[in-house]
Image: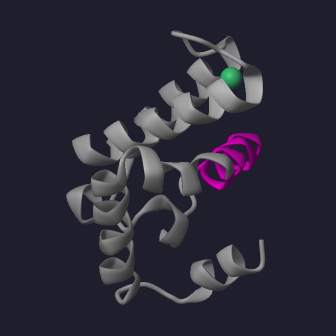
Amino acid sequence: MNAEEKKIVTRMVSIYCRSAHGSKAQLCDECNALLIYAHQRLERCPFGEEKPTCASCPIHCYKSDMRLKIKEVMRTAGPRMLFLHPIDAVKHFHKERQRNRHFAAKAKLSKKTE
Ligand SMILES: [Zn+2]
């Protein structure tokens, strides 16, 4: 379930870990734990394949420490995704825009102020 989202979060975490923690081929323990957690959340997401992207999701199922970490990952890796994996990034943001229409604009607002 959510194979595409899993691929994206995997890439984002590895971009982040390389730049923030200087990791090479493998993720550090902290990022590895975060990635496993993120995959579990995707598997259990009640929206299934119809889920909004996590940034615009109204549930925010991450527990708070993981949420902080994943936010940091998005902030660091998000812009880089556009250069490294432009097709995935565009697809992801396109999906986010489409699905945002179905959800409250609240999540979007808090994203802008960060
Ligand atoms: Zn790391």
Which sits in the foreground, 46 or 113? 113
Screen quadrant of the N terminus: top left
Give left or right: position of 62 versus 88: right
Residue reaching furthest front?
83
Quarter residue 69 falls in: top right
102 lies above or below 87: below
Residue 82: percent from left, percent from top: 45, 56
Give left or right: position of 35 versus 94: right
Residue 69 included in the magenta stretch of the image: yes
The part of the chain drawn in magenta is 62-75
Q: Is residue 36 visible?
A: yes
Which sits in the foreground, 67 or 97? 97
Residue 10: percent from left, percent from top: 43, 33
| Residue at x-position 57% and y-position 57% | 79
Magenta span: predominant SS is: helix
| Residue at x-position 51% and y-position 40% | 12
